[in-house]
Each structure stands twice: as structure tokens, then as C-alpha cells.
Amino acid sequence: MGTGIIAKKFEVLPDNLKLKVEGYIDALLIENGISISDSAEHNSIAENKVLEIKPGFGGGKGIIGYMADDFDTPLDDFKDYM
């Protein structure tokens, strides 16, 4: 299938479906470790940085930017149940 046919099909989609298609393409690129650089337009891959997420414990290390110091402290709302 040529890119011209894909572009024609893409153009007739409503905007909300175009966003879904773009998200799917980004997911495929990330999954396969493909990085694209387009100077005319920013793509939704953050600065062309491909993150490799490994399944299991510690697989998301480096993805979460901030976690509060008291993250593990029990919530006051659940004192009656503890």
C-alpha cells in the first residue's frame, strides 16, 4: 500500500480519529525503536527520545518525574479501617 493511498484515507477522517491514528503510529514507532526527526513540525514523540519500558518490577524507573516524600504514609481517611 502506497503512502499516497494512506494519506488520502487519513485526510477524510475527522480530527478525533486523526489523533487516534497519530497515537497508534507513535506507539508502533516506540515499540519498534524507530525514531523520526521532522524539523518542520514537532511530533508527539517527546524530542525523538524512545523510551524502553521493560515489564516487571522496576520497569518504569526514570519515567515518573516526581513522587512526594510522604507517598507511603497511610491516608487519614482510612484510619477507621486500620
Image (cartoon, rainbow, N blue to C red):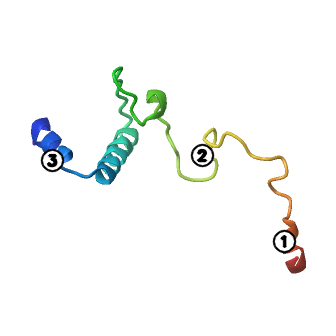
Q: Quadrant of residue 61?
A: top right
Give the left or right position of residue 77, taking residue 13 as reference.
right
Q: Quadrant of residue 66?
A: top right
Q: Which residue is mark 3?
A: 9
Q: Is 55 placed above or below 45 here? A: below
Q: Which residue is mark 2?
A: 60
Q: Give the class, few, some or many, for how many residues have Cα within 10 Å of label 2's Cα (few <14, many ≥20).
A: few
First in sequence: mark 2 vs mark 1: 2
- Between marks 3 and 2 in the image, the one whose residue lies nearer the viewer: 3
Q: Give the class, few, some or many, for how many residues have Cα within 10 Å of label 3's Cα (few <14, many ≥20).
A: few
Q: Is 19 placed above or below 43 here? A: below
Please, what secondary structure does the residue beneath circle 3 have? helix
Three-letter code, disc 2: Gly
**For this rendering, which residue is in front, 4 or 50?**
4
Please, what secondary structure does the residue beneath circle 1 have? helix
Q: Residue at x 59, y 47 (%)?
A: 59
Q: Which residue is mark 1?
A: 77
Screen quadrant of the N terminus:
top left
Three-letter code, disc 1: Asp
